[in-house]
Amino acid sequence: MRFLKETHINFLGMRRFGFVVSGALILAGLVSLFLQGGPRLSIDFEGGTLVQIQFRENVDISSIRTALEMINMDNSEIQTFGAPNEILIRLKTFQETESLTAQLSNSIKQVLPHEELEFRRIETVGPKIGSELSSKALLAVFSAIAGILIYISIRFEFKFAMGAIAALVHDVLITLGIFSIMNYEISLAIIAAFLTIVGYSLNDTIVVFDRIRENLKRFKQESYVSIIDRSINESLSRTIITSLTTFVVVFTLWIAGGEVIRYFAFAMIVGVIVGTYSSIFIASPVVVIWQEKAGRGESS
Amino acid sequence: MFEKNTPRLIIIGIVLLWAVYALYPTFKYQTLDPDELETLRQTGKLDELEKRTIRRGLDLQGGMHIVLEVDIQTLYENLASNRNEKFYDVLNAARERAEKTEQDFARAFMTETEANELRLRRYYPDFGSSNQAIMSALENESVDAINRALEILQNRVDQFGVSEPTLQKQGNRRIIVELAGIQDPDRARALLESTAQLEFVLLKDPDITQDFLTRIDRSLRGREELVEVTGDTAVGMAEAGETTEAVQTRTAQEKEVTLTELFGETAPEDTTEEDTSSVLVDEQLFEERPFSSLLRNLGNDLGVPEQNVFAVRRILEMANTREILRAGAGRLAWSTDREFWNSPDGAQEAFFRLYHLDAEPGLTGGVIEEATEDLYNGQPIVSLSMNSEGAKTWSRLTGANVGRRVAIVLDKKVHMAPVIRTKITDGRTQVEGFSNMAEAKDIAIVLRAGALPAPVDIIEERTVGPSLGLDSIQMGTRSIIIGLVLVLCFMVIYYKMSGIIAAFAVSWNLILVLAVLAMLKATLTLPGIAGLILTVGMSVDANVIIFERIREEFAKGKTVKAAIDSGYSRALTTIIDANVTTILAALVLMQFGTGPLKGFAVVLFWGITISMFTAIFTTRTIFNVVTSRRHLQKLSI
């Protein structure tokens, strides 16, 4: 069984189209980030308290809000989480959980006397730890990128490293933008997903680059652009199969993995799609542009 | 690599045996029925088995993750002698600086010391002569403090009875505690945070206490902080006076006074942290006796209705009040538990007791040799025995104060305040006043393990209930199985015979990763499951790269063997280059990640590393075996 026989698609000819699409997506994300004043960070980074409560029956958020008003916590954010009988409360401040659970269960019992509630998860992070985590997360992302840049520069050439980094920054920006548009928050787990996207996107890009490197040796008389197009076409069936299978895997995680991991899986889904696209429409074209600029520099 | 198949098959066989050996305990543990579990627990073999199984993270079995930070400020304060206002000013300024600039407290303290030209020698005479020397001695003390705290907490947690607690130091100020499958988070928290400073302190005479209250009332009367609350309400004569039955004095004249009224414009924003926006006072009384009207007389003790606690605290923090306390060489301490009385309308009302104590303790907990929880007349108690020096002091103290009361103070809260009936000479004492046996047990644990050198604060806490953990593991397992089955089906349909080989390699990959996790005593978390799923994707990718290459080589008209050979050799560099980048990302995550993130990175790292073994080495061997046995003309791919 085969999806694709030999293909001869002029990918590089479509690069302007690709740049426009990516530019528009990134711009939309940036606008959304700008309007919301930056990414929505979870308590992992900002400090604060998160309480997840499960009820026996479905609950009405407004009655929970009434209960929170009674203990002066009505500025907190309340949402259902997964099932309609499960809610998530986010408080902006670090709370002593001991008194918090007592206060919450008392006031909720006053509003909903017949409900039984179970505290499923309580997380509280002090502001100091939060800001430490943000700087650590940034450090991690940058050191990962630096390490990869060095590796690709050694194994390939510097211009390939530029292409790979362009694709990777592209993928992370788009995912971040989509998270902002969807109003999802960025937690530590999402940072892990981002780093995985980085890894996946590079994986994809490097398979194509590898083929380019091989074909550059084999077809010395061909033009740079045509060698790259040939390479993308040759590795296209692998790209599609791998993306499909990985997509199936993360998609199952998204559907069946449970609420806690849903956002993580969502980031991965976006990452797989965007990562596959960028290895074809961003990484290789950037290498071409870099090569053309360098070539012009030599000739003049 | 190897031209012959035998060495390859031997290597594969050894790895297989090793994986079975590594995974067997986990498999056995999962399939134990409750009876067998109980037998193993009794023979003590369960611990051994548990040590060799794959550990589930807190998100998969429920539990607590707590980050504690040693309170260096209090440590410095406790180490200092001859403390005066100037010293406190510097200490507080240092705290503010540390908070504002996110600086280390020690560094902030040094800066403030220099800025205020404080001579540390005055406060730390035993620590050196120059400020520099004293600062470094203090730094050593704080390093020592965290190490001791770690040891003491380890002792406490070990006796607490949770399976596989982990405690580790993070940096030089913090301790991470992970308690898996914990049922009662409040209890665990109390156990960790208790500094276990036990003191025996004599109570002030009731007359002196009365006098003290009058002084405070006088000092507060008419002060600007306390705005008059008479207003336009016509108030009848309050049934004032020192009626012993406090409950009955609470009449209709009582009015809710908001804190803003009480403290005028100075009412702080942080009132919200305490759930008391108003207090209960008798208006008439309030004017005359602004402090004692907030209290209720309970025979020999002072009672503070829960609603008034915050206001009373505010007054006790005022400089004037502190001065009066200091002048009388006294201090005030709260009771540990809220108690209830019945108000006239039949409702139950909570209150706390407030004790007026000597400033200096008669005896401190350092002399405790043994502490055990016990039952006495059906009540939970803790029996203490003291060393000889302690017993001597205790004997002198009790002998000289028969008839007076002594408060047993643990972590600045009064546990009980019994009347001394006779002189106690053998250094044995019983502490009562525990609400249940578990509480008595925990206090005995903290007393045995010793006092923390400095208080610890919880700065991060994550608690996952056991039911959420169960949901997570069910959903995680289900999704990994669905994902795996879908992908394997696809591989078999798309690559036929070769697809079966790949499917075998991918399942192999998963099993080996789990075996490595078991051997490394790593923890499987929910993100770890995500890492497994990603491993499946990457492992499939490696096979796809190889198979697509082989197909290409066939298209060029090569024979089966030649196509497989060049397919593998060409795919090799691609797979390595592609995987190394993901491994780099995983290594970075391992370096910076904590808890769940680390779990993800560990699984991803091993998953990809093993994938290179299974996808390249194992499948190649199978292909070799298949193609060497019969001379294939066509390969099913």
Image: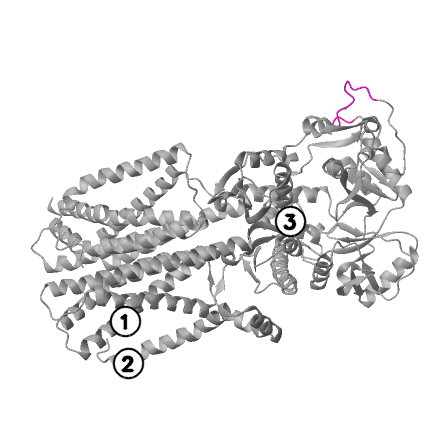
Q: Residue under mark 2: which chain is it in?
A: B
Q: Nearer the viewer, residue B558 or B177?
A: B558
Disc sitting over residue B617 in the figure: 1
Q: Extreme left residue here?
A: A221
Q: Residue under mark 1: which chain is it in?
A: B
Looking at the rendered structure, whether the residues under marks 3 and 2 are on a common chain is answered as yes
* Horizontal relation, residue B190 to residue A17: left or right: right
Q: Position of residue B583 (x, y in %)?
A: 34, 60
Of the image marks 3 and 2, the number of the one nearer the N terminus: 2
Of the image marks 1 and 2, the number of the one nearer the N terminus: 2
Q: Position of residue B259 (x, y in %)?
A: 71, 30
Q: CA distance from mark 1 to mark 2?
A: 12 Å
Identity, as a three-letter code, of the amino acid under mark 2: Pro
* Horizontal relation, residue B45 to residue B480: left or right: right
Q: Nearer the viewer, mark 1 or mark 3?
A: 1
Q: Secondary structure at mark 1?
A: helix
Identity, as a three-letter code, of the amino acid under mark 3: Gln
Q: Which residue is mark 2?
A: B7
Q: What's drawn in magenta, residue-wise?
A: B223-235
Q: Which residue is mark 3?
A: B73
Q: Residue under mark 3: which chain is it in?
A: B
Residue B151 vertical position relative to residue A84 in the rendered view, above or below: below
Residue B619 vertical position relative to residue B466 in the rendered view, above or below: below
Q: Residue at x 86, y 66 (%)?
A: B426
**Tag 1 near tag 2, CB within 8 Å:** no
Q: Secondary structure at mark 3?
A: helix
Indicate how the structure is coloured in the image: one colour
Q: Position of residue A198 (x, y in %)?
A: 33, 51
The local crowd at label 2, few if under 14, some if 14 to 19, many if 20 or more residues have their Cα within 10 Å, is few
Q: Position of residue A169 (x, y in %)?
A: 31, 46
Q: Quadrant of residue B41?
A: bottom right
Q: Is residue A202 visible in this depiction of the protein?
A: yes
